[in-house]
Amino acid sequence: MLPRSRLARLIWAASAVLLASATSVLAVRGARKPYAPSAPGYREQGPAGARVTVVEYSDFQCPACRLAVSPMKGLLALYGPELRLIYKHFPLTKAHERALPAARAAECAGQQGRFWDFHDLLYDKQAEWTPDASGRIFESYAKKLGMDLPTFQTCLKDPSVEALVTRDMREGNDHWVVSTPTFFINGKRFVGARQLSERGTIWVDQILKKK
């Protein structure tokens, strides 16, 4: 059995370590900036002042992401100006080798004001373009949407376009995104179309009921 004085010193030392650890955690938390998602304006829908912000991390080659398009549009229609959507690229490059080129193509469409049209077309035609390794099929989509084709082709070669995609991927990794689609509704995580359409709607209702 330890002498009482030594036991007291050990307890005091342990308490000091715990207190120091708690203080350091609080200091780190206090130093972190709150998550303030942003994207180029062409990847956003809804007013900036909306009470609910949905951040979507998605992959154009992901079948589950295609299934989430309809419920996401449903939320936008249901809540109107109360809801804002920010689309983030998160191509799962190891599993989907065409996802990154598709993200670059969508960015180039966005720079001509056609991001959401291209977004819908990529998901609608997912089975059509995924086997195409040439990238020419993206050019045919750009032409179909009435875009300036030479500008689109030049954009696809611009390294700054891929840098935008890479920035989204890095941000997703920082927020522990491991699968697609992943949604953050005012910071709360929902994974997949089912969670978005079921639990996500409940969460949005709870947010909007608060004063």
Image (cartoon, rainbow, N blue to C red):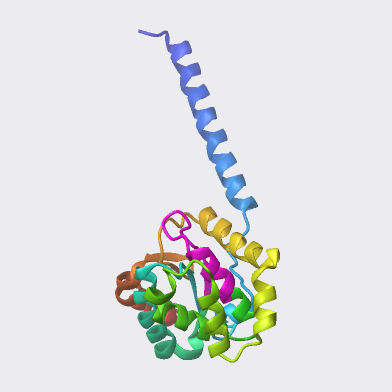
The total of numbered circles placed on residues is 0
Is 22 magenta? The answer is no
Residue drawn at x 63%, y 58% as measured from the top left:
33
Q: Relative to 186, is 143 on the left or the right?
A: right
Q: Which one is nearer the viewer's eye here, 68 or 148?
A: 148
In the displayed structure, 60 sits above or below 96; it is below
The residue lying at 39 percent from left, 67 percent from top is: 62
Q: Position of residue 189 (x, y in %)?
A: 41, 64
Q: Is residue 88 magenta?
A: yes
* Residue at horizontal 53 percent and vertical 69 percent from the top: 134
Which one is nearer the viewer's eye here, 78 or 2? 78
Q: Magenta span covers which residues?
A: 86-106
* Residue 139 in view here: yes
Residue 144 location in percent, x, y? 53, 89
Q: Quadrant of residue 115?
A: bottom right
Residue 96 on image: x %, y %? 43, 60
Quadrant of the drawing holding the N terminus: top left
61, 82: nearer the viewer:
61
* Rendered position, 147 above or below 167: below
Does 55 appear above or below 28?
A: below
Q: Position of residue 16 (x, y in %)?
A: 54, 28
Residue shown at 64%/51% (left/top)? Answer: 31
